[in-house]
Amino acid sequence: MLDINAVCYYLEGILKLPVFHLDRENHETERERDKEVQGFLQMLSEEDFKVLRQQEVCIHRMEQGIFWGGVNAGERLYLIGPTGFEPFRTGSKYYQTDYVAFVHCLLMLEEAVNGKRIGMLEFMMQNDAYQKWDQMLAKRRVRFLAHKQENEAVHNSYAQERREQQAIRDGSLERFERAVNEPLVGSVGNIRVEENRLFKDLALMVYMLSTRSAMEGGLDCEECFNLNDIFLEQVEHKTSGQEAFQLLRFAQHDLVMRVANLKNSKNQNPLVEEAKQYIKQHIRGDVSVKAVAEYLGVTENYLSRIFSKCEKKGMKQYVLELKIENAGLFLIYTDMACDEIAYYYGFSSSSHFAKTFRRKMGKTPLEYRREHKARRKAEDKIE
C-alpha cells in the first residue's frame, strides 16, 4: 500500500513547501508542525476551506498573490502551500515556487490520494480561469463579428505572410522585398488599444516569427534569440507605430541577409561551417584545432586542411581575427579598458593585444575607439 505520508514528505522536498493533512474540522492530522507552519493555516477562512473542499483537486488563489493547492479525499483535505509564483513574504519565511512544478506535484498528490491520473492540460481546462476564458471568447467573437460586418473589415492576407516568412527561410532578398511590397488590403487588427502599443506588439510578434523562420533556414538558434532580445529592447524605444514598423523591416532585412550569407557559405563545406559556429560560441575558451576537431569527431590534420582550403586561411588566423573583430565592438560600444578587453579575449598582455589589433585594423585600440565614438556622436547629433 502506498504510504501517503512518504509522498507528502517527497513533495515537500521538491517544492520546499509544507504539505498539510486536515480532517473534516480542518485540523491538522498525524504530523507535528512548528508554530510558524501551524500559523499558515490561520490564513485560511471558512470560505477558503469551503472553496478548497468543493473540488477534488484545485488551486485556490487568495489575496496578495498567495496560492494553495488542495486535494480533497473525503475525510481528509490535503493542502500544499502557501506559495506564490512571484516572491512574497509570510512571517519570517519566503515561499516561492515554479507554477509548472507546483501543478505537477499537486497532480501527483491527487493520484497518490485518490488514484486518479490527470494531465496538466486537462487540469487547466477544468479550472475556473479556462471557463471564464471560454465565456469571454464567445462574447468577444460576437462583438468582433458585428464590427467586421458593419465596417466590411478583413485582416491582411495569410498567403502574403507565408511568402514573407518563406523568403526569410530561403535567404531570398528579392522575394522578401517583393512580399513586403505587396499592397495590404486589410487591417492589422480590430483591437481597441493605443495605436503605438498595437504596432509595437505587432512588430514583436512578426519579428519573433521571422527569427523562427531564420532558424529553419539554418541560422544558429542562440544568434536568433540574441537578435530577438535586441529587437525587443530597441522597439520599446520607438515613439510611433511608423518607427516600430520601419525597425521591423530593417531587422527582417538583416535576417534575410544573414540566412543568405549562411547558405552561400554552406555551399563550401558543412563541416567548416560547424567548426566556425563552434568557434563563435566558445571564442573565450579553448578553440584550438585539437578542441574543435575533438568536438566534430575528425582528426586535426583533416580539419586544418579542409578549413584552410575553404576559408583561404588557417584556423588559428581565423580565431585571432574573430577575437580582434569582437574586441573592436567592445571598444566602440563599451567603456571597458583596453587591458580588460585583452584579458577578456585571452591575449597574453595588453601590449600583445595592441600590437595584434594594430596589425589587423591599421590603428591602435585607443585610436580606433576615439575615431568610432566621435563618429557615433556626430551621427546622434544628425538624428
Image (cartoon, grey):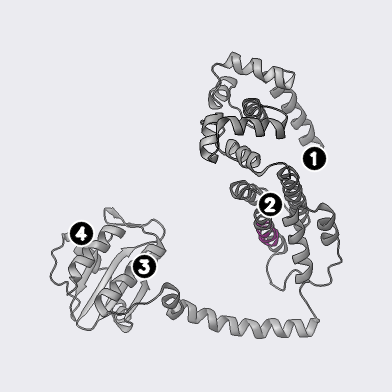
Numbered badge on residue 72: none
| Amino acid type at image mark 1 | Glu
- Total labels: the figure holds 4
Estimate the spatial distance between the alpha carbons at disc 4 and disc 1, rounded to whole Å: 60 Å
Q: Secondary structure at mark 4?
A: helix
The x and y percentages for residue 376 are: 75, 32
Tell which circle, 1 or 2, labels the residue nearer the N-terminal end: 2
Q: Amino acid at mark 2?
A: Val
Mark 1 against mark 2, which lies toward the viewer? 2
Between disc 4 and disc 2, whose residue precedes? 4
Tell me whether the residue at label 1 lies in contact with that at label 2, contact meaning CB atoms closer than 8 angstroms: no
Tag 1 secondary structure: loop
Nearer the camera: disc 2 or disc 3: 3
Quadrant of the drawing holding the C terminus: top right
Quadrant of the image occupied by residue 360 = top right
Q: Quadrant of residue 276?
A: top right
Mark drawn on residue 104: 3
What residue sits 55% from the left and 34% below the top?
299
- Binning the other alpha carbons within 10 Å of mark 2 as few (below 14), some (14 to 19) or many (20 upward) gives many
Residue range in magenta is: 200-209
* Kind of residue indicated by mark 4: Glu
Residue 206, compared with residue 52, is above or below; it is above
Q: Amino acid at mark 3?
A: His
Residue 383 got which mark?
1
State which tag comes first along the sequence, 4 or 3. Answer: 4
Q: Where, quadrant-wise, is the N terminus in this rendering?
A: bottom left
Name the one closer to the observer, 331 or 145.
331
- Residue position marked by numbered label 4 in the rendering: 36
**Mark pair 2, 3: CA separation:** 37 Å
Distance from the alpha carbon under mark 1 to that under mark 2: 17 Å
Residue located beneath label 2 in the image = 235
Residues packed near mark 3 inside 10 Å, few (<14), some (14 to 19) or many (20 plus): some
